[in-house]
């Protein structure tokens, strides 16, 4: 589960974001000042969202302090609209800047983009199983004996998400958000249809898949 640290002294906003992000599959911790943020960041986070108007010091101090030891993605979320402030935050090491008031969908999209940019590249663009091989760079699939398998763009996108996390469970919500967007996060029937097609095309025995595995009610995983 992706860990997010939110730094803001607005308690109502903190509670709202904590609940919203939790429903989208994020593990959320909060801090209300610079000292608390730097202490919490030391306990590990995959992404940090920080306000600039904090009670003890300017939020840019959070960005600068984290950047001395970590490259974790940082999104500034602030009511300050001045271009000079945005430049200062980005120059301090922030990856993105979102102004208040903001839309939840926009913030979630920017978080996903920041996490994608920070994700380590696959060690190899080729994923091989006993039933099929995926050349992710060329977007080409081959079955037993090297026979080509035709996949749709959506099928490729789903496989790429699983390949980035191969061996690990990827929840329904994450797959739906990454492939279709947050407005489709409850449409698990989309996943059932596409993964049934993928198994029919790639698995030797689609009824008893060895590689494209369903965790009922939770998500999917790619086993090699």
Image (cartoon, rainbow, N blue to C red):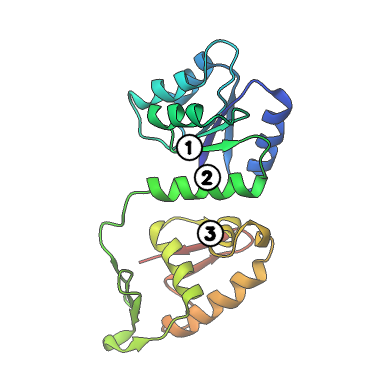
Label 2 residue SS: helix
- Residue nearest the viewer, comparing 118 with 141: 118
Which residue is rendered at x = 59% and y = 20% of the image?
A: 53
In this figure, what is the number of numbered marks? 3
Graded by Cα atoms within 10 Å as few (under 14), some (14 to 19) or many (20 or more), the crowding at tag 2 reads: many
Kindly indicate whether the residue at mark 2 contacts the one at mark 1 (C-beta within 8 angstroms).
yes
Image quadrant where residue 64 sits: top left
Label 3 residue SS: helix
Which residue is rendered at x = 47% and y = 18% of the image?
A: 39
Q: Which residue is mark 1?
A: 47
In three-dimensional space, the C-alpha distance between marks 2 and 3, rounded to whole angstroms, equals: 11 Å
Q: Residue 70 at x, y = what percent?
A: 35, 30
> Is there any visible trace of residue 43 in the rendered image?
no
> Which numbered tag is attached to residue 75?
none
Graded by Cα atoms within 10 Å as few (under 14), some (14 to 19) or many (20 or more), the crowding at tag 1 reads: many
In three-dimensional space, the C-alpha distance between marks 3 and 1, rounded to whole angstroms, equals: 17 Å
Which residue is rendered at x = 45% and y = 46% of the image?
A: 115
Q: Nearer the viewer, mark 1 or mark 2?
A: 2
> Which numbered tag is attached to residue 111?
2
| 127 w.r.t. 18: above or below | below
Which residue is rendered at x = 44% and y = 62% of the image?
A: 162
Graded by Cα atoms within 10 Å as few (under 14), some (14 to 19) or many (20 or more), the crowding at tag 3 reads: some
In three-dimensional space, the C-alpha distance between marks 1 and 2, rounded to whole angstroms, equals: 8 Å
| 104 w.r.t. 38: above or below | below
Give the mark nearest the N terminus, 1 or 2: 1
Q: Which residue is mark 3?
A: 178
Label 1 residue SS: strand
Image quadrant where residue 29 sits: top right
Image quadrant where residue 203 sits: bottom left
Give the mark nearest the N terminus, 3 or 1: 1
Quarter of the image that includes the C terminus = bottom left
């Amino acid at each position: 589960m992706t860990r997010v640290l939110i730094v803001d002294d607005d308690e109502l906003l903190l509670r709202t974001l904590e609940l919203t992000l939790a429903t989208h599959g994020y593990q959320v911790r909060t801090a209300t000042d610079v000292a608390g943020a730097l202490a919490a960041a030391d306990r590990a986070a995959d992404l940090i969202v920080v306000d600039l108007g904090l009670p003890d010091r300017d939020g840019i101090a959070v960005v600068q302090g984290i950047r001395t030891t970590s490259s974790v993605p940082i999104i500034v979320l602030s009511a300050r609209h001045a271009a000079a402030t945005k430049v200062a935050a980005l120059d301090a090491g922030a990856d993105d800047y979102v102004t208040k008031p903001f839309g939840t969908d926009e913030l979630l999209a920017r978080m996903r983009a920041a996490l994608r940019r920070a994700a380590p590249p696959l060690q190899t663009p080729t994923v091989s199983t006993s039933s099929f091989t995926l050349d992710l760079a060329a977007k080409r699939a081959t079955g037993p004996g090297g026979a080509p398998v035709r996949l749709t763009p959506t099928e490729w996108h789903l496989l790429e998400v699983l390949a980035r996390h191969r061996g690990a469970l990827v929840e329904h919500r994450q797959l739906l958000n990454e492939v279709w967007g947050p407005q489709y996060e409850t449409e698990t029937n989309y996943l059932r249809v596409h993964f049934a097609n993928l198994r029919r095309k790639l698995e030797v025995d689609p009824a008893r898949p060895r590689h494209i595995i369903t965790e009922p009610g939770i998500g999917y995983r790619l086993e090699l």
